[in-house]
Image (cartoon, helix red, strand yellow):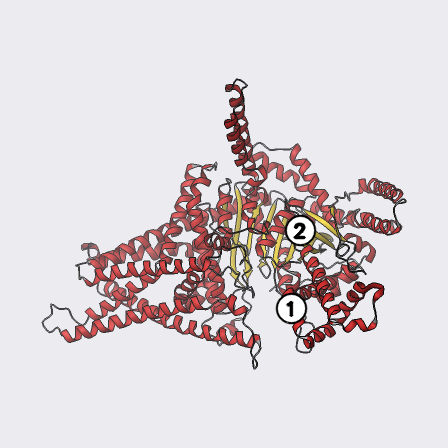
Amino acid sequence: MYISTQIGRCIVEEPDLKNRMLYKTLELELQAQGGLKVVKNTFQNDPKYELKNFDIRKRFDLRPQNIHSFNIQQNLQTQKIQNQEASRNLRSVNLTQRMVDQENITNHTHNGLLSALIHEAGQKVLRQVQQEPSSQQEQRLCILDNLDGNDMRLLVCITMFREPLTQLQKSIDGVVQSLDAFMKYGIAPHQIGVCVFFDGIENIHNVIDENGAAYHENIIPYFKSNLDEQYGIKDKKTLDYQYWEYKKHKKFLNDYNPQNIINLRKNKELLLKKYKKYKDSLLPIMKAQKGYQWMPQDEWVETNIIQAMIRQYQLSKQYIQDRENTAWVYQGRHVYQECTMPIFYVFKFKNGSKLSSHLWFFKGFCQELKPDYCLLMDCGAVPAKDSIFKLISSMEADPKVGGVCGNMRIEEEMDILSKILNKHFFSIKKCQQCEYDIGHTLDKNYESALNYIHVLPGAFSAYRYKAFSQHYIKYSKQSKQIQLLLQNQHKNTSDNQPDVNVDIDNQQSSQQVIPEENYNILNFYLRQVMESDYQYSSITEANMFLAEDRVLCLLLFCQDFYLKYIPDAIVYVDACQSLIDLLFQRRRWINGSWFALNYVQETYHDKLEGSSHTWEAKQMLKFSIITANLNQLQQYFFQSFQIVWLFMVLQTVVDSNGTINDRNYNHIQESTDNIVVSAIIGLYILLVLMLVYLSLTYDQQILNNVNGTIGQSKKQVQEQIKNYYYSRYYFVSTILGLMSLATVGYTVYLLIQQIILELKFSEFLEVPNAPQSYYSLLIVLNFGMLGLPFLFTLMTQPSIILSVIVNSIHYFYFQPTYTHLFITYAFCRIDDLSWGTKGLTEDNSKNKVFTDKIYKKYLFVIKWIVLNCLLSGILILLLRMNISMLPSFLILFVSVILTVISIIKGFLAIIHLIQFYMPSGTKARRDKLINRVDKRRETLERGKTYNTNLQQFFMPQNSR
C-alpha cells in the first residue's frame, strides 16, 4: 500500500566533505526561555580524569547564513576576514588554548543546513514587520504574495520511542505523498521541515536476536550504513558512539551509586568480580589518581578500586547531568524532484515524555525556524495522499481556524481471504476500527459544527503557529497600558506627596501583572516539562496533564480561533494489539479526559470573557461543554444504570409468570423469583467489586520493582503475576459482558414484541398516549437522526460505512468490556500517571505529585462506589414499591433525554457534513483557493535553485 523510501536518501552522489559541512551533526541544548544553542564538548576524555576538566562544555548561538547566489562571495569574504582577525588574536595565547579556540572558530562559523533555514526565518520576520495586514482579506492576499519566499511554511513533528525503522519510514512516506500538492500551491519542499524526536537515546530500537546479530529494523545500523557513510560522519560524531557512551555512563551511574559501594565494601569477592568486568575503564582512573606513586601491585588494593569506582560515579553523574536538556541532532534531507526537504533527527539524551518532545518542537525548532503551521504526528501514523495538504489548506482558506484534525483510521493490511479465515473471530483491532469510524462520523462532525473540537489528537493534528501567542500578547499590552494609566492618575491626585502604603500596593499590583511572554499558552501547555522541579498541586492536576490536549483546545478557542475537523484528511494509525494494551491506554484517556474536562468546566467562563468571539460562538461552546458533562455523568454512573436496567429486565421476566392479583398466583413462586432476582443482582455487584479489588491491587509500579527468585528470573516472575491478574480481568469482564448482552438482547426482544408485533399502525395514530407509541416515536427519531450522518458519509466516503458494517459485530462484542473493565480500572488507578502504551509503564512523575495521592485515590474510589450505590438503591427501592407507571415513566424519562442528545448530535453532524461538502462549503472554498494558482513549475525551479545554492555555499573553497 505504501512505497517504502530510504530516509534522507540522495539522488545525486556528492563529495563527503561537502556533505559533512552541510549535514553536520550537532549537539543542541534547549534554552529555558526557548530557542536552541550549539554545545561544543572539548575535554570529553581528559587523561587526568579531573572533575573540573572533564566534560567542559561551551555553548554557541545558532548562526544564520545567507546562501543565495548574489551574497555568496560577500559571505565568503566576510568569513575569511573574521577568521583572519580571530587567528591574529590567538598569537598571544598558549598552545593548548590556541588549538581549542581555533577549532571552535572553524566549527562554528556555520551550523550546516540549520544555519540556512534560520536565515530564512529572520528574513520572514523582517517582512512581517514591514507588511502588517489590517484585515483578514489583506492577510490572505499577503499569504499568497509571500508564497515565493524560502521561509519555513510547515514544520512536522514526529514523536518516537521504541518504534522500529519501518514505522518511521512509513510516516515520512506519508509526508512525502503531500509534497506534489504543496508544490502546486507554491510551497517548495525546502519550506516543509520534518523533526523526528527520539525520546531517550538509550531507548531507541536496538534489538539483538538470539545469535547476537542486530535486528534489521534497528535504528543505529541504518544510520551507520547510510547517513554516516553518506554524509561523512565519523568517530565521536556518530550516533553509534553517542548511544553506547551514554549507556556506559548510565550503567556506571547505577552500578557505582553510594548504596552499591557500601555493599561492595562488605563483599570483597563481588568487588573483585566487578573490577575485572570494568577493568578497562577503572584502571586508567586508578593510575591517574595515584600519579607518579603508581605501582603495578596497587591495582588489586581494595581501597584503590573503591576510590576509582567513586570517581567514575562522579564523572558519570556529571556526564548524565550535562545532557539532561540536550540532544544529538542529525541534519538530513529527502530529495524530491531534485529539491530538498529538510529532516532533523533529534535524539534526546534524557527520556522525558511525549510532552517533552513537544517542548523541544515548539520552544526549540519552531521558535528558531518560525513556521506558519505545525503538524503533530505519532511515529507509525501514515497520512493518505494529500491529507497533510488538506489540513494546512483548510487553515489557509479560513484565517479564523487555529487548529484542525483529520480522520483517523486503523491500518488494515490483510486481504479479503485472510479476513474471512482469521482464526480470532472477535478482533480487538477491528473493534477499535469501528469505534474510530463511528466516533469520527458522529462526534467529530458534531463538535466541528460547534467550531470547537474537545481534543485535537496528537497522533495527527495541525495548528496555526501564531495561534499560540497572538491574542495573549494583545491582552498583555492592554494590561500594561491600564496599569500605566492608573499610576499616572495616582501621581496626579497625590499632589506630588509620596504615600508609602499606596506605593507598596502599586508595587504589589505591578508584580501581579503577568509578564508578556507568560501569556503564551505554550507556557501553560508545557509547564510541567519546562520546569524540572515542577510540583503538581493535586492528583487532579496530575491526571489533567494526561490529556493536556483538551486544555490546549480550550485555550486556543479562547484566543479567537476555531477548531475544525476535516473528514477527507485520512491518516492510518496503529491500533493496540491486545486487550491489556488497550486497557492501559484507555486508563490514561479516561482519567485524563475526566479531570481535564472538570478543569475546562471550572475555568472556561473566565477564559471566555477575554475572547472576541461572537455571542453565538460563545453559546455554542457552552452547549458543547454541557453535552460533554452529560456524557461524563453517564460514564460516572454507568454501573448504577446497568444494575437498575438489569433489575427492570429481571422484574419483567418475573411478572410474566403472573401478578399478585391473578387468581392462580403462587406465593411460593413469588419468593423463588425474588430470591433469583436478588441472587443475580448480588452476583453482578460481587463481580463489579471483584473488578474494583483487582484494579486496586494490581500496581504496575510495584510490579516493575519485583525481583527474581532462585528458580525464576525477574521477567518470569513479572509475567507470572501479570498472567494471574490478566486471567481474572478477562474472566470477570467476560461474565459481566455476557450479563449485559443478555440484558440488551431481552430488551430488544421486548421492544420488537410490544412495538412492532403488538402495536398496530392505526393504534399508534389513534392512541398516541400509550407507552408503546412514545417508545416507537423515540426509537424512530433516535435512529433516524443518528443515521443521517452515516447515510451522507456513505455517499462521500463509502469505505468508512462499509468498514462500520463489517466490524460492528466486533464492536458490540467488546462494548461491555469497554464499559465495565475500562471505566472501573481507570477510576481505581487515578494514581497511575504513566503513559501505559509502548512499554511505558514507569511512573516518572513520582517526585512531582504530593505524597497523599494514595489517600486521594481511595477517597475518589469510595465516593464513586457510594454515589453509585445510593443512586441504584433509590431507583430499585422506588421500583419495588410497585408505583403505577413508575417503570414506564423512568424508561420514558431516560429515553427522552438520550433521544434529545442524539437528535442534536445527529442534526449538527449532518449540518457540518453538508457545510463541508456543499458547493459553497469548506471543501469548495479550500479547492477554490488551491485551484486559483498552479505554481508547480515555478516552485520546482525555486526548489532546484535553493538546493543548488546550498551545495555551492557549503562546497569547500578548493572545490569551487
Q: Is residue 59 left or right of residue 93?
A: left
> In which quarter of the view is residue 321 placed?
bottom right
Query: Which residue is identified by label 2?
Result: 193
Query: Looking at this view, is 740 or 361 the one in front?
Result: 361
Q: Amino acid at mark 1?
A: Ile
Provide residue 640's location: percent of width, then percent of height.
32, 61
Q: Is residue 804 left or right of residue 633?
A: right
> What is the total number of numbered labels drawn onto the structure image?
2
Q: Is residue 308 above or below residue 103?
A: below
Q: Residues within 10 Å of mark 2 (few under 14, many from 20)?
A: many
Query: Which residue is identified by label 1?
Result: 262
> In which quarter of the view is residue 725 placed?
bottom left
Q: Is residue 293 left or right of residue 405?
A: right
Q: Amino acid at mark 2?
A: Gly
Query: Looking at this view, is 859 or 917 the one in front?
Result: 859
Provide residue 890's location: percent of width, then percent of height.
25, 57
Q: Please identify the quadrant where the N terminus is shown.
A: bottom right
**SS of the residue at dot 1?**
helix
Query: Looking at this view, is 946 or 620 the one in front?
Result: 620
